[in-house]
Amino acid sequence: MAERVKNGMGGALAALDFDAELMLRVKEGDGASFGVLLEKHRSSVVHFLYRMIQNHAVAEELAQEVFLRVYRSRSTYEPTAKFTTWLFRIATHLALNALRDGKNERSQERLDDDSSDMPARQVSDRRPSVEQSMVYQAKLDEIRRAIAALPEKQRAAVLMHKYEEMEYSQIAKVLACSESAVKSLLFRAYETLRARLAHMA
Amino acid sequence: MNCPLETPENAQVLLDYGTRKLDAQRTAILERHMEICPSCREFGAQQRALWEALDSWEAAPVGRDFDRRLYQRIEQEVSFWDMLVRPFRPLMVRRGLPVAAAACLLVMAGVLIQQPVSSPIPKKDVAQVESVQPEQVEQALDAMEMLNEFSRHVRTDGQESKL
């Protein structure tokens, strides 16, 4: 199996992609390997989609669709790229479509409320005061607004770079553009964010 | 070192510095440059501040029933496919599907051969009907009259011979 992955992707880096190996096992009918992939990437996919769409329920629904598509594609899967590149390409595609379809109509409204669609944060250890909580919430809302105001591609690039810690080359593959285009997208996006959130420094 | 802010291709160095992704050697070079370049110093500080601000946006935990709902959807898809294929399964199991398909084809071919093709009358035929001349109609009527006359004679001859 590992040899197949190595041959299919051509190189030592490809051989290290254990996820692709797991996906090939899923292709051969190993349902448990799909469970491992789900366990490993569930949070990052949901979080990425949540930050893109800014609506928890829609983000989870889209994340379900991502994993459903992965499962459906198992029989035709070929490890031509890193598994996470493929996974985030599906997620980004769905998120951009959802944003264009206006599925997140309520999300902008939600920015004004107290984020009631999100599960409660686990802050019991530190027990912040009401004032601290309000300051934190105000700060969070500003960040969410600033990210939401970015053009879709810049937003996706920032979220993959900042929160998923992806390399420029991988983001480029997900967004189907050149590496220099990604650097340019990120530079402009961070410039906008710095300007909008300068007072928070 | 050229100022990264003045050379767009080097601007990535400042981003990487701000996101703490720059290797030690390049960090040292950039920091030496920052000592004499207030613009880059400010840029680096702002990028680091932004990075820390973005860190505070923690995503909510994934719903507890996420996996259950996903597997339920997978199960439903499998069940739907199963339901579609079920009526044909005995045929597939007995490897009789090709035979059944061939039999169906034969029956359909037979039905098609039995039924005359009810295609619309081509315009050419219509034109032919329209081009029948009055003389031809007269001739046909004469022929029919002659045949009637002939059959009347045959009947009268027969009755006379019986008598």
Image (cartoon, rainbow, N blue to C red):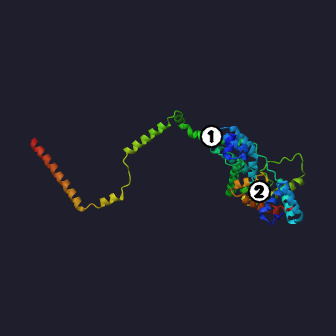
**Residue matched to label 1:** B78
Name the one closer to the observer, A14 or B136: A14
Which element carries disc 1, helix, strand or loop?
Answer: helix
For the N terminus of chain A, the image quarter is: top right
Residue B6 image position (x, y, % from top left): 80, 66
Q: What amino acid is labelled 1 in the image?
A: Val
Up-down: is B94 above or below B29? above
Q: Secondary structure at mark 2?
A: helix
Q: Residue at x 68, y 43 (%)?
A: A5
Q: CA distance from mark 1 to mark 2?
A: 37 Å
In the rendered image, the residue lying farthest to the top is B94
Disc 1 to disc 2: CB gap under 8 Å: no
Residue A138 seen in the current view = no
Instruction: Note whether A200 is above or below A24 in the view shown.
Output: below
Along the horizontal axis of the image, is A110 left or right of A128? left
Q: Is residue B6 left or right of residue B100?
A: right
The number of discs equals 2
Q: Chain of mark 2?
A: A
Please state the horizontal and vertical placement of residue A126, each as a whole percent of the image. 90, 47
Q: Residue at x 12, y 44 (%)?
A: B158
Of residues B111 and B17, the one drawn nearer to the viewer in this rendering: B17
